[in-house]
């Protein structure tokens, strides 16, 4: 049996979680998931501005903090972003005692034109549009890598494995493949490891965080424990957490996480296999323990998924707060004034969106009518291809403090900032076109 702990569900997750996973009890592996689609484009822009950047810098600080205390535990992280080598070099400066392996091959940003010239069909999975329509605006392009390249990196003996865009589930499945020697066509076991990775990939969502069911009764969320997978060679596993930590692990909590980002439950497709979630069996197995069994898998597809981020214009969002009485009416009137002024200026946008925090920001038109509230926040934003037009919008909100409905406040930050809109585009690519490479760095 091996114990695989998760210590990060995204870049920006609780900084103390991975430290507590290492200090709370014995673990064999610590998986750290830093990447999301938008994160890749942010890191690519950082790398373009400075070739020494492009990775999750929080990870370097963490390794400097815990490196001397890893003991026999090994770290598997996708903190490398679009620059795994620079990330590894920074880790070695922060923790010279560590050995680090890097996994590369996912970043195909510089190969897109080569693929197109070779006639590789690259069409958006949602719309069918060809890549050529956005090629000049692409910011990043990365293939989702699976567990077997990570297992290869672990076979080097390195204490820390740093990847770029691996799948979230591979950070858990990779250690299982390495430790148990699972074959590439062992579909049921690979599917079991994939399900385990899916359960823990979002960190504390598997231990009571962001949970809808009876969340008020969960003990000590301020000290919530992050999940641990206790995995067995046959493919069964338990989800648990360190004793004495907050939160709760139960079949109900785990079931809620299983539904996270789930399309067809019979076809959860990864680079390693296709998992059937309808075969999963959950059983409460004592305090804060859930046993998982019955997972079934099918052969992997001949393709890998490509995640592409591209520039899609500009946006700005501003807010004003109106107080009682007639807070709702004041906020609505202010929103209409802004729209009329934009029309008179001849400004055109792809979208102008208004919502009222305290009334309908979460549920939109489905929100139930509310009595006259003590305060309402107007939130209005625009999106479009013309940065100058978006910038002009930002100058139309603050004047309402004196020229609009009474009792406006909440404008202390001045004009809202203009931000680039980064959109997501995905396609499939034949897996034989992608080659990965593992390299060990030591200092």
Image (spheres, rainbow, N blue to C red):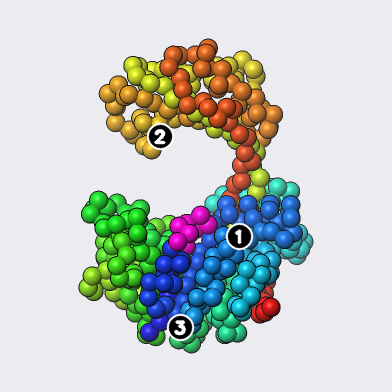
Residue 192 appearing in the image: no
Residue at position x 48%, y 87% from top? 181
Residue at position x 35%, y 59% from top? 223
- Which disc, if any, is residue 186? 3
Residue at position x 22%, y 73% from top? 286
Where 229 sits versus 254, above or below?
below
> Of label 1 and label 2, which has the lower sequence position?
1
For the view shown, which residue lies furthest in the top direction? 403
- Residue 77 position, x and y percent, is 54, 69
Q: Which residues are magenta?
A: 8-16
Which residue lies under the disc numbered 2?
361
The verdict on residue 123 being magenta is no
Give the quadrant of the N terminus. Answer: bottom left
> Of label 2 and label 3, which has the lower sequence position?
3
SS label for mark 1:
helix
Q: Residues within 10 Å of mark 2 (few under 14, many from 20)?
A: some
The Cα atoms of the two marked residues, 2 and 3, are separated by 47 Å
Count the numbered circles shown: 3
Q: Residues within 10 Å of mark 1 (few under 14, many from 20)?
A: some
Q: Quadrant of residue 4?
A: bottom left
């Amino acid at each position: 049996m091996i114990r695989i702990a998760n210590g990060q569900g995204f870049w920006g997750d609780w900084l103390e979680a991975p430290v507590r996973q290492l200090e709370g009890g014995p673990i064999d592996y610590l998986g750290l998931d830093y990447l999301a689609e938008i994160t890749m484009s942010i890191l690519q822009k950082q790398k373009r501005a400075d070739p020494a950047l492009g990775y999750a810098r929080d990870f370097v600080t963490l390794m400097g903090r815990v490196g001397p205390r890893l003991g026999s535990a090994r770290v598997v992280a996708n903190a490398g972003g679009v620059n795994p080598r620079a990330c590894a070099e920074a880790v070695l400066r922060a923790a010279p005692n560590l050995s680090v392996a890097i996994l590369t091959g996912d970043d195909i940003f510089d190969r897109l034109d080569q693929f197109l010239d070779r006639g590789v069909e690259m069409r958006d999975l949602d719309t069918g549009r060809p890549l050529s329509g956005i090629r000049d605006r692409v910011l990043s392009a990365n293939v989702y890598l699976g567990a077997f390249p990570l297992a290869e990196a672990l076979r080097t003996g390195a204490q820390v494995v740093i990847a770029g865009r691996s799948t979230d589930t591979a950070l858990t499945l990779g250690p299982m493949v390495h430790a148990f020697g699972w074959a590439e066509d062992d579909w049921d076991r690979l599917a079991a490891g994939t399900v385990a990775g899916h359960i823990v990939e979002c960190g504390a969502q598997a231990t009571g965080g962001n949970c809808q069911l009876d969340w008020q009764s969960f003990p000590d969320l301020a000290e919530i424990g992050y999940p641990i997978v206790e995995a067995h060679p046959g493919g069964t596993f338990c989800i648990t957490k360190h004793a004495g930590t907050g939160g709760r692990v139960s079949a109900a909590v785990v079931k809620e996480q299983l539904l996270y980002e789930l399309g067809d439950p019979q076809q959860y497709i990864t680079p390693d296999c296709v998992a059937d979630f309808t075969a999963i069996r959950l059983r409460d197995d004592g305090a804060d323990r859930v046993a998982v069994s019955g997972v079934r898998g099918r052969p992997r597809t001949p393709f890998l998924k490509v995640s592409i981020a591209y520039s899609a214009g500009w946006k700005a969002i501003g807010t004003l707060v109106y107080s009682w009485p007639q807070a709702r009416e004041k906020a609505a009137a202010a929103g209409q004034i802004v729209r009329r002024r934009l029309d008179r200026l001849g400004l055109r946008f792809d979208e102008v969106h208004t919502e009222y925090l305290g009334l309908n920001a979460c549920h939109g038109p489905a929100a139930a009518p509310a009595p006259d509230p003590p305060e309402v926040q107007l939130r209005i934003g625009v999106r479009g291809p013309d940065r100058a037009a978006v910038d002009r919008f930002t100058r139309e909100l603050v004047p309402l403090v004196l020229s609009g409905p009474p009792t406006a406040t909440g404008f202390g930050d001045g004009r809202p900032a203009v931000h680039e809109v980064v959109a997501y585009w995905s396609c499939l690519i034949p897996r034989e076109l992608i080659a990965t490479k593992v390299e060990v760095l030591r200092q």
